[in-house]
């Protein structure tokens, strides 16, 4: 049984990893300060909070702090790498894919030159978009890992609630057993009292019959 469960777990992990590898970024557009900008976009099968936490944790581990600009989370002077020369300012925006798809998120990313005013960039300017796409692709395993952490945390809560309910039921069982024991004692006393009372009734009947007989002889 243990070997079966271990094999099942390995298969599940392998499938999860393979699934994460099929998630790929693409070219897209995003609105910044009322203007459309060329962006890298990736469709992720995770909640928005999972995606946002992944990004925050990733850059925090690299020593970068975020700021907010017009609804975008921004990390400045980051060495993006790939084909980009020098550092970049990275803009991220995560939003729910649709009202019907709660568990799906669209993540947009725009990379600019340090200090560049993104508002002035025209839609045809695709500077660093391809590198941003590569960057998002490389982040996919991080999103998957964070989502698993969220699932573990959620399952731990489910387990804690189940254990709490089980403990409560055990406590109720103990209370019920005590009540049953007390009821048994009360029942035994009631039966004994009935026997005594039956004897009393019989004696009182005899007294009544004797009185009636006495009256009849008068």
Image: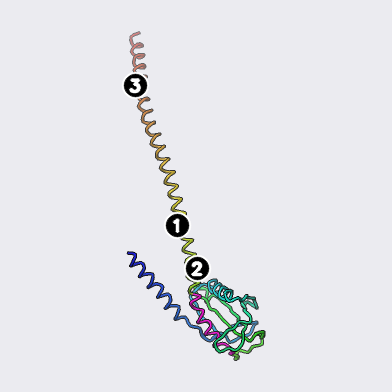
The label number, if any, that marks residue 162 in the structure image: 1
Q: Are marks 3 and 1 in contact (CB under 8 Å)?
A: no
First along the sequence among labels 3 and 2: 2
The label number, if any, that marks residue 150 in the structure image: 2
Q: Is residue 22 above or below residue 169?
A: below
The N terminus: image quadrant: bottom left
Can you name the residue that lies furthest to the bottom here? Answer: 124
Helix, strand or loop at mark 3: helix
The C terminus: image quadrant: top left
Q: Residues within 10 Å of mark 1 (few under 14, many from 20)?
A: few
Q: Residue at x 45, y 80 (%)?
A: 21
Q: Which residue is mark 3?
A: 202
Q: Is residue 80 above or below residue 181?
A: below
Front label number (3 vs 2): 2
Distance from disc 3 to disc 1, alpha carbons, whole Å, reads: 58 Å
Q: Is residue 53 above or below residue 87?
A: above
């Amino acid at each position: 049984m243990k070997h079966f469960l271990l094999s099942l777990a390995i298969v599940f992990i392998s499938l999860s990893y393979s699934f994460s590898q099929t998630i790929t970024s693409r070219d897209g557009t995003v609105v910044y300060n009322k203007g459309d900008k060329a962006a890298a976009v990736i469709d992720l099968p995770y909640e928005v909070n999972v995606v946002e936490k992944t990004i925050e944790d990733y850059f925090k581990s690299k020593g970068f702090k975020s700021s907010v600009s017009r609804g975008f989370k921004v990390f400045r002077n980051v060495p993006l790498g790939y084909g980009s020369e020098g550092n970049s300012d990275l803009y991220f925006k995560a939003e729910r894919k649709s009202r019907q798809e709660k568990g799906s998120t669209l993540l947009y990313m725009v990379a600019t030159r340090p200090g560049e005013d993104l508002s002035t960039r025209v839609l045809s300017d695709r500077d660093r978009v391809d590198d941003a796409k590569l960057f998002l692709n490389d982040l996919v395993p991080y999103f998957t890992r964070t989502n698993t952490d969220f699932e573990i945390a959620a399952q731990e809560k489910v387990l804690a609630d189940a254990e709490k309910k089980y403990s409560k039921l055990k406590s109720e069982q103990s209370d019920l057993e005590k009540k049953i024991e007390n009821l048994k004692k009360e029942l035994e006393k009631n039966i004994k009292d009935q026997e005594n009372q039956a004897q009393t009734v019989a004696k009182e009947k005899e007294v009544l019959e004797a009185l009636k007989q006495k009256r009849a002889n008068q």
